Image (cartoon, rainbow, N blue to C red):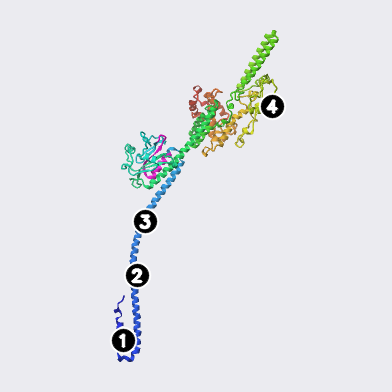
Amino acid sequence: MLDYDTFQPEQTVIDQAELLLANRESQDFTAAYRQLLEDYKRLFKVSRRLVRMSDRSDEVLKLANEKIKAQQAELEKAHHKLERHAETLEERVKERTKELIITQGRLQRLVGLGIALSMERNQARFMEMILQGAKELAAADGGFLLVRNAEEQLFPEILSVDTLELRFNRANGDEIDEPALPLRDPNSGLPNYFNPLVHAALTKRTVQIDNCYESTEYQFADLHRFDQQHAYRSTSLLAVPLKPRQGEVTGVLVLLNARKPQTGKIISFSEEVVGFVPALAAQAAVAMENKNLTEAQERLLESIIQLTATAIDYKSPYTGGHCERVPEICMGLAQAACDAEEGPFAEFEMNAEEWRAFRLAAWLHDCGKMTTPEYVVDKATKLETIYNRIHEIRTRFEVIRRDRQIACLQEIQSHPDQKDALWLRFQEECRALEEEFAFVAECNVGGEFMAPEKLARLEQIAQHRWVRHFDDRLGLSHAELQRLSKLPVAPLPAQEPLLSDRPEHVLPRNEKQVRYDLQAHGIVLTPPKYLFNMGELYNLRIARGTLTDEERFKVNEHVIQTIIMLEQLPFPSHLARVPEFAGCHHETMDGKGYPRQLHKEDMSVQARILAIADIFEALTASDRPYKKPKTLSEALRIMSFMRDDQHIDADLFDLFLSSGVWREYSDRFLMPKQLDTEDVSRYLSDLD
């Protein structure tokens, strides 16, 4: 503030004026002068006030300016500090961003591994993905995967150490020279908690060790032995139990020697890694459990299928081993087609799922036979149903012979003088009856052709009469009585023909016997009018073989039933073609087969392979009681005729011969006496 001296001149003027006014000699101008002085004083006062106000404003401004300068200095300091903080924060953000990127990469890798593990079906690659994925997540130098076995041991399945270039995978057939770790002491039976790997399995918790050579918490004899054997030093260790869905531990994932990414220096496993690896282990455990369950289901399915096929074989001694041997030929011929590098099968190949579908189809190709009556499958003679009715016919011949013998003796008693002639006639009648029965028995066995004269003789023999004295409706089943209900009861004694086709021999077909829509399944096979016809003459008149038209349809129907049964099963997509493969083994290349009359171009290679396998096995089988097995040359000759008649695929039959599949199968399943040829070139297609 300005001091008083600043206004000294003005104050002096005022003091002198007041002295002047006080002098009496100046009275003449006192009033005017006084007024002037008052005005001057008032102006002076205002001026001083203004000056003081100005001084105060300057002081305030000075103080404000100083405060502003001080604040500016503080602001500059804060700005510099903020700049330094911003730089530090930016560095931290960059570092954290880098960490987040690494974490995101690990998360993505973790998710990707989980998806890949759930899809991988190859055991070796599956194990490799678990261990390699864990090593990448943890930046570990080595590791191994131990699987818990039935003996309650941790068994090494895969081992990998980068710096040692050590790689072993038991699923690839590698032998891992590492002993199994027992979960319990073999002597005391106590849990082996002192081994860190076993400890992880027993407690179901992750074990983390910073330095295995300094830690006193566990025993590291097994790990040190590994180090000595491979000139290695296992420092940091992470053991994570594989525990699917809160269940029992199935194994332990072990990682060794975490490495710093920039320098490769061995460090401890970080807390972040300790969080990621168990997550991978959990995913791996679930994937492993799912994989094991899937494989177990597949093995169960195949076992059930093989059990069903074996049961069908055992159902009839006439087809014993057929369902078991056909797949052997199928697999061999399919492999030959896949291996072909030229010719019609150069482009043919099958993946693992197609192989499995084809193998199941080969096992199931005759599953429809479980619906075929056993006596039809086994029918070795024309009169055979549940049993061979030739015995009934023989009994009737016996009755006729006995009746004639009685009649002869009665005539001799009445005419003793004609005894020799009557007895001679009776013996001639007996010889005739014996010849006729032998003829009927021969017809019953069946053959290639029934000549017209044989049919005529059958009709003649059928006219012989025999007398029945007992009620033929006693001891019958309800179904038999129903078939006889509309027929009149013949009074006893009743004369009946030796051979007959009776109404009750005919079994009508009804809706209950046909529970499928032929057209819906593409079946062109027409069912006969009757379900069965057991007429004696009707059966004995069979022209070829032993089956009637009704029975032959019933046998052929097994393919229809195979198709229907398999199409009703909820096969997964990769097995969806099983019904197709299995249902075509009786089709022919010319479209005259059954049940759909498909042509070659309508059938897959697998279906055509199955047809060849089915025929070759049937021709060479030695366990069929009703026929003598064909020799190799006979079987191949017959099949070459079938090829020429377009019944089987010519290209596949040539491949069957040229690839040696016939030889491999023959050496395993044919009897030595059937192996009558080494040169099969003459059965190849005529290239000219």
Where's the C terminus, which quadrant? top right
* Res 64 label: 2
Residue occupied by mark 3:
89
**Disc with the residue nearer the chain's start (2 vs 3):** 2
Q: Given this view, does label 2 or label 3 mark the residue nearer the observer?
A: 2
Q: Which span of residues is magenta-colored?
A: 125-152
Q: Amino acid at mark 4?
A: Leu
> Which residue in the structure is indicated by mark 1?
18
Which residue is nearer to you in this view: 642 or 551?
A: 551
Mark 2–mark 1 Cα distance, whole angstroms, equals 42 Å
Residue 429 versus residue 578: which sits nearer the camera?
429
Looking at the image, residue 34 sits to the left or right of residue 614; the answer is left
Q: Is residue 587 magenta?
A: no
Above/below status of 316 relative to 12: above
The label on residue 487 is 4
Displayed quadrant of residue 593: top right
Q: Disc 1 on helix, strand or loop?
A: helix
